[in-house]
Amino acid sequence: MSYTELAAAGVAGAVIADLWLLRTRLLTRRIFWVSYAIIVVFQLIANGVLTGFGIVVYDRGAILGPRIAYAPVEDLLFGFAMVTWTLSWWIWWGRRAARRSPASTTRHVDETE
């Protein structure tokens, strides 16, 4: 399987998980897209350094060909999938933990007590 196919599968999986499996619905929120825009800038800088200096080299037969900041466009797909998967699971696990421990059992302890 090529890097392109793996990156596309990662994006498809992340979208399915976010919208239907975990139902976190991050992709429907403006804050996600604003945050992702910040992340993608730093991803492009890191990719540019790693691929521009030849630290990471891609097999030309495994990618589409077009590059952004020296890195193949597939890196943007892969990065999007990683960020979306990570945030979706983070929210899902957080919601699950919140349901297990009711707020009424949590007690704030003042340091003066």
Image (tube, grey):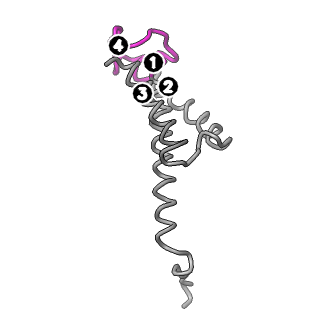
- Percent x, y for residue 35? 61, 40
| Residue at the spot of label 3 | 9
Amino acid marked by disc 3: Ala
Q: Are marks 4 and 1 in contact (CB under 8 Å)?
A: no
Q: Nearer the viewer, residue 63 or 27?
A: 27
| Residue at the spot of label 1 | 71
Query: Tag 3 or tag 2, which sits nearer the N-term?
Result: 3
Q: Secondary structure at mark 4?
A: helix
Q: Secondary structure at mark 3?
A: helix
Residue 76 got which mark? 2
Q: Please provide the residue range marked out in magenta.
A: 49-74
Q: CA distance from mark 2 to mark 3?
A: 13 Å
Assign the N terminus to one quadrant of the image: top left
Query: Tag 3 or tag 4, which sits nearer the N-term?
Result: 3
Front tag of 4 and 3: 3
| Residue at the spot of label 4 | 62
Query: Tag 1 or tag 4, which sits nearer the N-term?
Result: 4
Q: Are marks 2 and 1 in contact (CB under 8 Å)?
A: yes
Q: CA distance from mark 3 to mark 1?
A: 19 Å
Q: Is residue 3 shown above or below 60?
A: below
